[in-house]
Amino acid sequence: MRILLRGLLQLHRVHVDAEAAGTTEALRLIREHRPSLVVVDTHLSEGSPADLIAGSRAIVPGVRLILIAPASRPPPTLPKEGAPDVLLLKPFRIQQFLEAIAPPAPPGPPP
């Protein structure tokens, strides 16, 4: 899955600084690279998506977090403060992935 996600990101000109199999390694890399976007798959070799999301936000408060989970199982239960910016269920379409990784639109003027 990491190979597929890395390829999709690079295909759409998103620079990939690093990748990790588990929470400990991921948090070390986040401290080192301070990314603006982190894509998390629920299948981790160690740790939990909730720990990775909370740890990422503690290190880089404005980081955008995309959580990818299988549609065949209920998504992980996460505390509100540990919720990702986007929950993307797999299988997904490439367009859905592009929409998920796109930066949010700046707020417009009030109606």
Image (cartoon, rainbow, N blue to C red):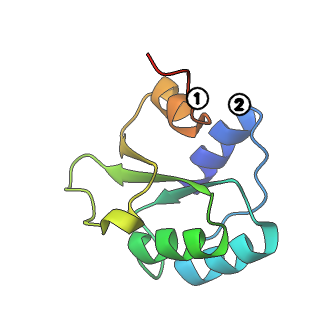
Q: Could you tell me if residue 21 is visible in this image?
A: no
Quadrant housing residue 89: top left
Nearest to the observer: residue 47 or residue 110: 110
Q: Single out the residue that lies furthest toward the top.
A: 111
Image position of 6 with respect to 61: above or below: above
Q: What residue do we see at 56% from left, 68% from top?
A: 57
Mark 1 residue element? loop
Q: Nearer the viewer, mark 1 or mark 2?
A: 1
Q: How many marks?
A: 2
Measuring from the top left, give residue 103's x and y in whole percent.
Answer: 62, 36
Which quadrant of the figure has residue 111? Answer: top left
Q: Is residue 97 above or below residue 64?
A: above
Which label belongs to residue 24? none
Q: Residue at x 72, y 32 (%)?
A: 11
Seen from the viewer's position, the closer of residues 111 and 92 is 111
Count neighbours of disc 1 (C-alpha within 10 A) and say few if under 14, some if 14 to 19, many if 20 or more: few
Task: Tell me the kind of residue under disc 1.
Answer: Ala
Image: 62 above or below 102? below
**Rendering coords of residue 81 (x, y %):** 39, 66
The quadrant holding residue 61 is: bottom right
1 or 2: tag closer to the N-terminus:
2
Report how far apart the C-alphas of labels 1 and 2 lie in the structure. 18 Å
Residue lying at the far front of the rendered structure = 110
Label 2 amino acid? Answer: His
Disc 2 crowd, CA 10 A, few/some/many (<14, 14-19, 20+) = few
Q: Pointer 1: what residue?
A: 105
Residue 3 vs residue 74: left or right? Answer: right
Picture coordinates of residue 2, whole percent (x, y): 58, 55
Look at 56% across and 22% down and name the residue there.
Answer: 108
Nearer-the-camera pick, 16 or 82: 82
Across and down, in percent, residue 73 comes to 20, 55
Q: Which residue is mark 2?
A: 12
